[in-house]
Image (cartoon, helix red, strand yellow):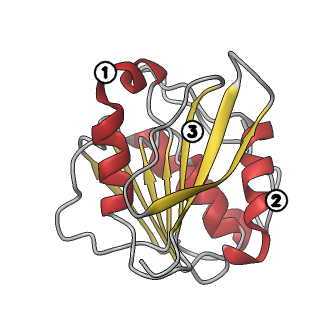
Amino acid sequence: MRVTGGLARGIPLRVPAKGGVRPATDYIREAVFNSLAAFVPGTHVLDLFAGTGAYGLESLSRGAASATCVDLHAGADLHANAAAVAKSMGVAALPFTAITGDATKPVANAGTFDLVFADPPWELWETRAEEIVANAVGSAATGAHVRVILEAPGGFVVPVPAGWKLRKVIGKGKGQPAASIFVRQAGE
């Protein structure tokens, strides 16, 4: 598990031993960021179900303005990963916030974000898909520039939220992770 691009490319990320973290694979993250390409620099990023913080920290490595990571078990490993990325980037601290909380619920006083990632434990897709999607799109800023990326098991059809459209699905196939990229519908 490592940062796949940007200034901190190659930095290993610690995976928390508790909390049932299933980190996003290097392959899927790299494919997602390759798809987002020049969109990431300057964005404000929300990483829901952050675990290692891989999506948020990778965004910072690739030029995002800030990252907020939310996870029930946001702890020492997440902070250690942020410190390692900061050191690799040659800065004392990152524009990074870690919040311990339920990523299916709105984050109080967090603002809105240009880029929202949600990579929940796969079993939550079966029971709480609507909450996951609603919180992710509810945290997004207004405007056509916003992207929401929802990672789910391959073969699972992520519900398309009202006012949004599926732009692309990135993945290798059933049983492997797949990332659905959503954009606002024109005129929304």
Q: Nearer the viewer, residue 153 or 167?
A: 167
Identity of the amino acid at label 3?
Answer: Glu
Residue 123: where, in percent of width, then height?
A: 42, 17
Alpha-carbon span between mark 2 and mark 3? 15 Å
Crowdedness near tag 1: few (<14), some (14–19) or many (≥20) residues, C-alpha within 10 Å: few
Q: What residue is pinned by disc 1?
A: 127
Q: Left or right of 66: which side holds 127?
A: left
The reply to whether residue 83 is visible in this rendering is no
Which of the two discs, 1 and 2, sits closer to the camera?
1
Q: Nearer the viewer, residue 90 or 53?
A: 53
* Image position of 143 with respect to 47: above or below: below
Q: Quadrant of residue 127?
A: top left
The N terminus: image quadrant: top right
* Image position of 138 with respect to 114: above or below: above
Alpha-carbon span between mark 1 and mark 3? 15 Å
Crowdedness near tag 2: few (<14), some (14–19) or many (≥20) residues, C-alpha within 10 Å: few
> Which numbered tag is attached to residue 151?
3
Q: What residue is pinned by disc 2?
A: 34
Q: Nearer the viewer, residue 46 or 162?
A: 162
